[in-house]
Amino acid sequence: MRSTPKNNIMRDLAIVAFSVIIAIVLVKTDALAGVVAAIENMRLFGSFLAGMFFTSVFTTAPAIIILGGLSKAHSIFLIAVMGGLGAVLGDLLIFRFVRSSLGPDFSYLVKKVKSERLTAIFRLKLFHWLIPCLGALVIVSPLPDELGLMMMGLSHMKMRYFIPLSFVLNGAGILIIGLIATSI
């Protein structure tokens, strides 16, 4: 049986719903508090793990807390570098999923709309340049990276550009978090 874009959209929505349920269970059972305490004790590896968690909508808040705490106790720059490396790995996982799965599904939805104006906007050269820039702004912010990664995935950015860009943007975001944490 062949997979259709409509079936893929339903599968993707089910995955997101399942992720939300897992996140709610983790918060309600206080399981997250133990994980946060364990990661903070591992300094470099902890900052790498927190960087991975920094990229997802479901784990951004605890990751910010961990990275801020680690920055208070250790070198801000080392935490930013290790956290940035972890964030690259997290972003790669999300980026590959967005590019291989959500990209075709998004294209399917745009075709279904049948709006000439919407189609014309997506074909503009400005759109192809502007979307990755907006995605980069989302990634450098403490906001979850999924929206920014979706923008970059839809623009068909090559991996050789994406990996260093992800490292620099996430590392800068983590450095800003560390500077704020140490100033408080």
Image (tube, rainbow, N blue to C red):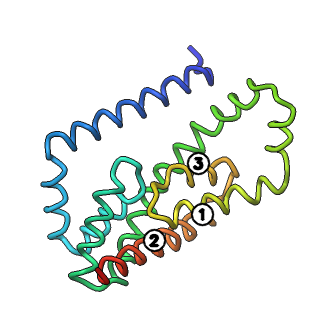
Give left or right: position of 92 versus 183.
right
Looking at the rendered structure, the secondary structure element under dot 2 is: helix
Q: Amino acid at mark 2?
A: Gly
Neighbour tally class for label 3: few under 14, some 14-19, many 20 plus, Cα within 10 Å: many
The location of residue 140, given as percent across then percent down, is 51, 67
* Picture mark count: 3
Q: In x, y percent, where is residue 11?
A: 48, 25
Q: Regarding mark 3 in the picture, which secondary structure is present there? A: helix
**Identity of the amino acid at label 3?**
Met
Q: Which amino acid, mark 1?
A: Ala
Write the residue at 36% across / 78% down.
180
Q: Quadrant of the N terminus?
A: top right
Where does label 3 land, which residue?
A: 150
Identity of the residue furthest to the front in this view: 184
Instruction: Please tell me whether residue 141 is drawn above or below residue 7 in the rendered image.
Output: below
Q: CA distance from mark 1 to mark 2?
A: 11 Å
Q: Earlier in the sequence, mark 3 or mark 2?
A: 3
Q: Which residue is mark 2?
A: 173
